[in-house]
Image: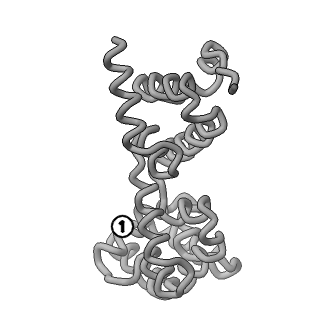
Amino acid sequence: MTDIPDMDDLEDSYFNILDEDERALAKALLKESLITEEILQKFVDFKISRDETGKTYLGEVLINMGMIKDGDVEEYMKEHDIQHLEFLETLANEGYILPEKLVEFRDVHDTMEVSVVSLLDELDIMTKDHFMKLFNNRFRGFKLGEWLVLKKKITEDDLDKARRVQKVNGLADYLELNNYCSNDVLAKVKEKMLSAT
């Protein structure tokens, strides 16, 4: 028989990361031995990572899932560097980037082998997300996911799963997506929780 964890100890550890509904669901699932503390910790780590960035980026999701490497994202960025450099000039001409920041960027970019988008972010000129939104609003190039499928680095199924991970909104979504609990089991636990109140 599995030892039921001491809920007071859990309260002091990672339960403060969970919202009220997630805490109640986690306690019920742990009590019924439907998930382990390790599974709950994986969700907490996922949630902390997402909360730190404010967004779950597709590249990060695919890397964390072991489907691609950091180098694959950099390869994508470098392949688009010429277009990004031209667009950077356009942004500077339109006043999105201060002239002195553009000079700083050029000085560093000429000496480093790093993508335009990564360097803009590193120099705190513009975030990757902001630059890519501006770029994608004006140009139709391959987005990262499309490019990875085209280069046969991932499959369409891999891309679909990663996009579902990006949309995870809570503990129940995470458990179902990762096949830790079925939707039916989660519904029964939630029903039992409601009837107990």
Decide if residue 107 is in sight here.
no
Decide if residue 129 is in sight here.
yes
Left or right side of 81 for 14: right
Q: Quadrant of the C terminus?
A: top left
Closer to the camera in the image, 88 or 22: 22
Left or right side of 183 for 104: right
Q: Quadrant of the N terminus?
A: top right
**Residue matched to label 1:** 133
| Figure check: 132 above or below 142 | above
Q: Residue 146 placed where, x, y %?
A: 42, 79
Q: Residue, x 51% and y 67% (percent of image)?
A: 100
Counting labels gives: 1
Question: How many residues crowd around disc 1 within 10 Å: few (fewer than 14), some, or many (20 or more)?
Answer: few
Q: Residue, x 49% and y 70% (percent of image)?
A: 158
Q: Helix, strand or loop at disc 1?
A: helix
Closer to the camera in the image, 23 or 185: 185
| Figure check: 174 above or below 142 | above
Q: Residue 24 placed where, x, y %?
A: 45, 22
Rendering quarter of residue 76: bottom right
